[in-house]
Image: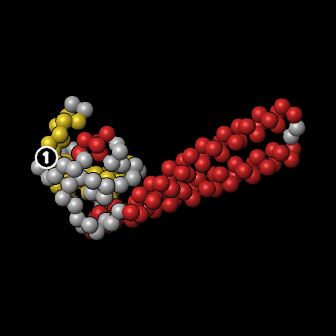
Amino acid sequence: MEIKIQLHTVCLAMLQQSIDTLERAMADAQAAANDETKSSAGDKYETGRAMMQAEKDKYARQLATALANRHLLETINPKERRQQVRAGSLVRTNEGLYYFSAPLGKITLEGKVYFALSMASPLGQALLEKKAGAEVKFQGRRIVVEGVW
């Protein structure tokens, strides 16, 4: 169970780092747009401003996703032991170790590789509500659930 708490903490830290980076990028894009307003005129100004607005919008979408993922993580109690695969489950299969939480990818902790995935991911959907001992076919492969915590 301790490893699940550590994974949860790492995931929260990764998301917070991403949120901080995106907030800085948005502020930088706004500052650049403000500078562009002061120094340009005409069509060139409009094109530059539109490009900066598009960049700011991209960061805003990424930030909204990161904030939603952080909210999801904050609703998960990593101390809760699970019998079935669902959000907050640590799952060992014949193919690897998965922490179903937020889509953050590969995490190496204490020499082991884990994958933080969303329950909305294809693998998450395939394993949803499965218990230890269950087998599923996934993308032509046989996956065996060896343990759920």
Q: Note whether 42 is above or below 75 in the view shown.
A: above
Picture coordinates of residue 56, whole percent (x, y)? 66, 46
Q: Is residue 38 visible from the viewing direction of this image? A: yes
- Position of the N terminus, as image quadrant, is bottom left
Q: Is residue 96 visible from the viewing direction of this image? A: no
Residue name at image x 83 percent, y 45 percent = 37
Residue name at image x 66 percent, y 39 percent = 54
Picture coordinates of residue 139, whole percent (x, y)? 25, 32
Q: Quadrant of residue 6?
A: bottom left
Residue 87 in the figure: left or right of residue 91? right
Q: Note whether 67 is above or below 37 in the view shown.
A: below
Picture coordinates of residue 45, whole percent (x, y)? 82, 37
Q: Residues within 10 Å of mark 1 (few under 14, many from 20)?
A: some
- Position of the C terminus, as image quadrant, is bottom left
Q: Amino acid at mark 1?
A: Ala
Picture coordinates of residue 82, whole percent (x, y)? 22, 61
Residue name at image x 46 percent, y 58 percent = 70
Residue name at image x 13 percent, y 46 percent = 134
Residue 47 in the figure: left or right of residue 114? right
Residue 115 in the figure: left or right of residue 40? left
Instruction: Out of 126 and 17, give the one closest to the viewer.
Output: 126
Residue where numbered disc 1 is placed: 134
Instruction: Out of 64 and 31, give the one closest to the viewer.
Output: 64
Disc 1, SS: loop
Direction left: furthest residue: 133
Q: Note whether 10 is above or below 132 in the view shown.
A: below
Q: Quadrant of residue 40?
A: top right
